Amino acid sequence: MFNVANATTLRRGRRATSVALLCTATALISCTADEPFTQDQDSSDIAVRNGDFTKQSLDATSVAIQLLDKPTAFADTRIFVTLSKDDAGKLANPQVVGAGDEAAPIVLRDDGKGGDAKAGDLVFTGLAFADVEALKARAEAEAKQDVTEVPQFVGRSVETFVPATGIDLEKFLGGGVIKLPGTPKLLFSLASARHSLMITDPSVVRDFKRTYDPCTGDGDAMGPWGFGHLFTELANQSATGIDPADLVEDWLASWLTPQLPGSASVPVAARPMMQQLIDDWRNVSGGGALDLKQAPFRLLAIVNRIDLARRGKGGGGYGGGIGGDFLDAGEGRFVFGLVLPDGYKIEGYNKPGVLDEKTNCMLTPFTVIFEYKIDRPGCEKVRDWAQQWRALDTLPFGSTYNAALQDITDQFTAAGVSPGRGNDSALGQLRTNDFLMTFPWQMREHQLPVPSGFLTPHQVADTVDLFHDGTNSLGTWIATNIMGLPPQSFPWSGASDVPSPGTFWDGAHATLDTLLITSGPGNDGNDSRHNFSLGACSGCHARETDAEFTHVDNRTPLGRTQEAILSEFLLGEKINPSFDNTVTGNLHFVDDPSIAPRGGTINPTNPQHRRSFRDLELRQQKLVDFSSQSCLKLPPIDVEILEKSLLEKVPLPDDLFKGVQPVDTKQLPSLSLERLGDVPVAQVH
């Protein structure tokens, strides 16, 4: 129960640190090479948010399935997972690998017993119940796709194209072994992406039954997609005692004094011009509390970030692992832009923005993103969530579409939907991108404290302080670490400054110099630098993607046919800048910014020198994949026998299910079959 009396004492204090052990007792086998370690609580939160754990999951080279000739009370399908020799060598017991998560593991064995055909051939075999209906649905959908090849993404850029291969359902149902394709058979549709992933259509963002345009005064800021409504739900006043107007003003007031969020080492300077915005909003409100019905923020986009779904490390805690199951279903987001209508001064600001001459309203370079966590763990819940979004593709924009979209968004914006999170809200973080108040462009992050309180400045995810850029220490770290989050020797930044569109992250190191200039496919040194820079707010919003500070731009007059301009990083093609989102047919490429400064020459055929970003296409691949994934049902096993086999290095019994009572398949835990073949990529943007 919240302590309403103490609500006002929870403002912007630094949180206490606590110990986070990332290896559990039953996971000792997979942790023997690395001692358990502790982290500052803030850093631990960020690591878990982005799916980063103590060790990378093993990467299966192929996954195949086959129906059993004679189903049993514990399984009807064999699962074949092939590992490379190097990955198999990392196992504590070279004949056993775990899949799934600790609470519900599936054992894959390479000992020639229990369904495995041959010991030591690197093909690990497990038993489960197949999700035949889902396989049928996927096969039917893929049969309708007239596509011969699909892009294969490495990280967030296209590395190559692979043949578009669908599920051979007939062969599977006939008892044959079928190999799962690694990429969905899908012809990318920007129109579909704009229906179910990045929704900016004017019929949505200017639906004045649900949101508000402060430039014209049309609509309702307290409607379900209005800025005022979302803040009211964040406050959850009936449970916390926090007035929504106080929550907003307290949040804005954090810009007025220097901040040292979390474990940040460098204070974030105040931006005093925020006081002018607060004063003008108060004046428009008639004095006193800020009137949320007149909030000067207009809706730009509603965004589905199911691609950010976090997954466990996998392995079930046993001897290394693959196929970690879903911890959540990613995020749902609302993007707003700050505007200065009549009654707001524009003098004194750094860059007031673009004037909408029709409304005499200033469209500023200041955006706000509400980023909500979708707490739906497990294969079946994630699939259901993905299917809700995909159903929007079948609806034309209009009243029916908007009602269906609201049915989705209400599930994560409503007060009290996430018990145990701050204010019982699903909000993960509130982010801002600001070039209005002063130079330079700056991104900040706020979070709601647990159990309740006001929005608290928080260190910016995946971004270190800017003074580390170009240093020997950062170069050494990049050269010796492959796509990992920085250690505590690089404290997270309290805010992410972007001095220019040319900003990117790099480090000084002789080995790194050679790696970057001579890199080719599979060169981890180059990808490590790029991923570090792309993961940082200041890299992703600047030179690493060639974005001009924003991926959803507020500085466009919105009307019946005009919508917020999206970055070419999202669209994957060049656009007509400052006019609309019409793609030109010319693909968006970004030359690695670290090559030329080292005296190297860009090789346009090298995917580590010239990267092709098509982020909406990557997200659509994920959405389609998740919505059609088949959820294996995992049979119960005697965990004590498994632990004894691993700890004492004795062979597994031929029959893992001996003495175990069968369970109704509807009650069994599930694991995505498709997730056995891939490794999650940590990302947040």
Image: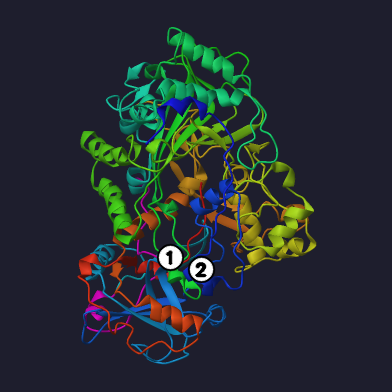
Horizontal placement of 72 versus 474: left or right?
A: left
Query: Which of the two residues, 41 or 352, is positioned nearer the viewer here?
Result: 41
Query: Which of the two residues, 466 or 49, is positioned nearer the viewer here?
Result: 49
Q: Which residues are magenta?
A: 168-191
Query: In the drawing, what numbered circle is on residue 324?
Result: 1
Query: In the drawing, what numbered circle is on residue 57?
Result: 2
**In the rendered image, is residue 182 in sight?**
no
Q: Main secondary structure of the magenta part?
A: loop
Sequence-first disc among 2 and 1: 2
Give yes or no for residue 208 being in the magenta stretch: no
SS state under label 2: loop
Mark 2 and mark 1: Cα distance apart in space:
8 Å
Please report the residue visible at 21 percent of the width from the left and 86 percent of the height from the top: 70
Say what amino acid the circle numbered 1 marks: Gly
State whether residue 573 is above or below residue 656: above
Position in image of residue 550 (x %, y %): 54, 37
Label 1: few (<14), some or many (≥20) within 10 Å? many
Say what amino acid the circle numbered 2 marks: Ser
Q: Please say if the residues under marks 2 and 1 sit with CB atoms less than 8 Å apart.
A: yes
